[in-house]
Image (tube, rainbow, N blue to C red):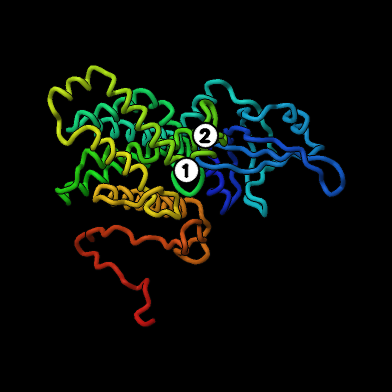
Amino acid sequence: MQTMTIREVKQAAATAPVTAAIHAQMDRAQVKPTKSGSEFLELKLLDAHDSFILRIWGDSPAFAQVRPWPAGAFLCVEGEWTSGQYGLEPKQWHLRPLEPEEKETLLGGPPQLREKQETDYTAIAVMVDGLADPRLKALCRLFLDEYGARFRRTGGARDYHHARRGGLVEHVAQMMRSASALAEVYPGINRDLVLAGVLFHDSGKLWENCYEKEGFSMPWTEPAELMGHIPLGIELVNRLWRQLMESPLAEEWHIQSLQPAGETVRLHLLHLVASHHGEYQFGSPTLPRTPEAALLHYVDNIDAKLEMYSESYATSPLVAPNIFERRRPLTTHAVRSLPVFVQPESGDTGSDDEFPAKL
């Protein structure tokens, strides 16, 4: 039986029944009463991209099998899947615990996603190594060395965009590519500062949106609730900066009399972290006041919005041809984008019949 991700099964079952095995982690299991007074189990199952609810009725052999399993257990559900009123519904199904090697494969994510995140993390490291300012380069490298593993399992958000294990790496890598390209267009921009700001702008999410070491659940934490990721990111930058200033590198920088001065560099980097949401109402303690801060804010917004469109195309049902059900926080329905132009082969005149000549 073929193994498919939750998202793949949802997409396939939307049009026809599909027989497949789903590997997932049990986020929670709740015993609930039926209208007749008996009991059923409601499981929330997660994988790297998606989730769904599996209901196990009290008269099913799986009820007694699964009831003692703890939250966080890894399992395989095999059967014929259809899309019903309450989402995915299995028929003639059974489940079992995952083998250790199956669990490791699941935690790594689907091959395509795993490969993308590896490529993105490598791209981040390469761009960090290419920074000209030795202080920003050392600060970014220290962050990757100390927090790389945690960074690689942090989501870009709890909902809305890049909300998956490792999503923050994807978000940061794409933002760094965009910021680097824009720095070429606007030569007055301090490229080193912007790229360092991109790396650190959401660094507080390592304590706000970090997934468990071995799981797909994102626990709530007291530091995140009391502080939020922007103050946590500011605190992290300051701690790592102090660490660098106490290292032999700092003495070398002092002898070289590097300009601009180190404290000015630190202050401008903190400003990028503090202002990246762009508005007081969206949680920024200050507003962007430099070209670098403005560029980072807009690049952040662009990447988040384009990811929302991508997710909408992948997961939202169609309400009409090429028009998708609204996915929050987008303020409108997403409409399928115009395909990239392809030069017609010789003799192929193409057609414009799809769009009415008169409105």
Q: Residue at coordinates 67% horizontally, 54% vertically from top-left?
A: 85
Label 2 element class: helix
Residue type at numbered disc 1: Ala
For the C terminus, the image quarter is bottom left
Query: In the image, is residue 335 above or below residue 67?
Result: below
Neighbours of disc 1 within 10 Å: few (<14), some (14-19), many (20+) = many
Can the viewer see residue 217 in this picture?
Answer: no
Q: Residue at coordinates 65% horizontally, 30% vertically from top-left?
A: 71
73 left or right of 226? Answer: right
Q: Residue 302 in the image: x percent, y percent?
A: 35, 53
Label 1 element class: loop
Furthest residue in direction right, as rendered: 37
**First-in-chain label (2 vs 1):** 1
Q: Residue 50 in the image: x percent, y percent?
A: 54, 42
Q: How many marks?
A: 2
Q: Which residue is mark 1?
A: 157
Q: Nearer the viewer, residue 157 or 282?
A: 282
Q: Which residue is mark 2?
A: 223
Res. 293 mark:
none
Q: Nearer the viewer, residue 49 or 208?
A: 208
For the N terminus, the image quarter is top right
